Structure formats: structure tokens, C-alpha cells
Amino acid sequence: MAEFSLASGSQRSGQGGGVEWYESAGRSDYSFDTPGPSSSAATYGTFEDEPPLLEELGIDITGILQRSTCIASSRTRNLNLEELDMGGPLIFVLVLACIHLLTGKLHFGVILGWSVVSSIVVWLVVNNMAGTENPESQSLGLYSCCCLLGYCLLPMVVFALLALIIPRGFANAVLASVTTLWCGRTAAKLFVKKAPSISDQTLLVAYPCTLMYSAFALLTVY
């Protein structure tokens, strides 16, 4: 019966000129198209096309140096507050903690924790002073506040370096006071520039900022 069906099937295909309905068991017509070497290169690219690592991480070294120069020279008018980044503040926090480590103080977690908590407190105070219904208060976000306070930490880093060679005493205390006032005044000027509606309350803005940096100064001295 199997031979008869195979024969009849082949006869029908030969007479009608159609497709063969019965094929031998040993025949296989499976074929796969493998991609050529050019397709993978077009899909994934090369290492030369990859952006630099710092650019992928969002760290702009040139921008950090420019903002640091403006903070160090107190030329806040030339500082662009629309392009703030967290790279500079994190570098300053890390450098300050490393300087403390040279004196035998392990303050990495303390400095980072104080920075975050102080930034939240200052952000709440400044936003309440600016008013929640004021459109300018929308630009005073927590991220901007952390960036501004972090960049103003630069004079404190310089003071920590000088404290390594200046013995503890009257000169060290005077230098710590001047550095603290410098940081607080610069931070207040940046907040006023960010929200001009609080320009008549500069001293009130400078007060919590000065308290924040005084904690870092005491941490450096003692």
C-alpha cells in the first residue's frame, strides 16, 4: 500500500506538473542564512566610536575647573548656575576626607553625611524664604542646592591643607573663622543669584550656610 501511494503520488505530480507531495525520508531542505562579518560591525560599532568614560559619567573637567576658579576668586557673576554638576562637590568631599585621613581621622562617612543633611536643611530654609508660590523657588531644587554648597566647600579644602602645616593655636583659629565666613558668604551670594527675590535677605541666607561650614571647620581643627 505504501509503494502504491508513492507511485500514484509521483504520477499525479508528473501529470499535473505541480509540487511533489511525497519526498524521500533521507532528504532535508533546511537552510539558514548566517550574517556576514560586515553586519556585526555595522550594528555594534568599534571602540573608536565610543565616547570617553568621563563624558559617559557626566563629569566635565573643564566646567569643574571654571566653576572652581570662580569660587576661589569670588567672581560669582561669571558663574553659570544653569549648568551645575555633582562631579565637583563629590571631588571636594573626597579630597577633604583624604586630607583628614593624613592626620589620622577617618571622616569619609561623616563628611558625606553632614554634607547631605546640611544641604537638605539649607534647601528647606531657602525655599521657605523664597516662598513656595514664587516661580523662582522652582529653580532652587535640592540638586542645585547640593551643587552650590558643594562647590563652596573649596575654601574649606584649602584650609584643611594649610592646617597640616600650621600648628593648632590662635593663627589656626583665625584662619578657620575667615574660611568659614568666606564659604558662607559665597554660598549666600550664589543663592541670591539663583533666586533674586531673596536679595534683601542675604544675611539670613548666609547664617545657615555659615553654620554648615563651621561644622566642617571644627571637624578639621579638632
Image (cartoon, grey):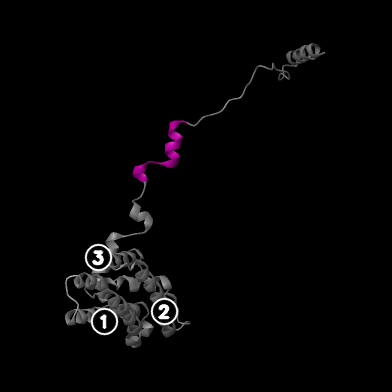
Q: Residue 207: say if magenta.
A: no
Magenta segment boundaries in residue numbering: 36-49
Q: Which of marks 1 and 2 precedes in the sequence?
A: 2
The kind of residue tagged 3 is Leu
- Quadrant of residue 167 within the rendered picture: bottom left
| Number of marks drawn | 3
* 16 lies left or right of 104: right
Q: Residue at x 35, y 52 (%)?
A: 53
Q: CA distance from mark 3 to mark 1?
A: 25 Å
Left or right: residue 84 compared with residue 77? right
Using residue 91 as the reference point, say whether residue 8 is left or right of it.
right
The amino acid pointed to by label 1 is: Leu
Image spot of residue 139 (x, y percent): 42, 74
Label 2 crowd bin: few (<14), some (14–19), many (20+), radius 10 Å: some
Q: Give the mark nearest the N terminus, 3 or 1.
A: 3
Q: Of label 3 and label 2, which has the lower sequence position?
A: 3
* Disc 3 secondary structure class: helix
Mark 2 lies on residue: 121
Q: Nearer the viewer, residue 197 or 219?
A: 219
Q: CA distance from mark 3 to mark 2?
A: 30 Å
Q: Residues within 10 Å of mark 3 (few under 14, many from 20)?
A: few
Identify which residue, 175 or 104, lies in the foreground.
104
Q: Which residue is mark 1?
A: 181
User: Could you say where residue 153 lies in the image, as x and y percent from the top left?
Assistant: 29, 72
Q: Quadrant of the C terminus?
A: bottom left
Residue 73 visible, this angle: yes
Residue at image mark 3: 102
Callout 2, which amino acid? Val
114 relative to 8 in the view: left or right: left
Mark 3 or 2, closer to the camera = 3
Q: Could you tell me residue 193's position as x and y percent?
A: 33, 78
Q: Is residue 81 visible?
A: no
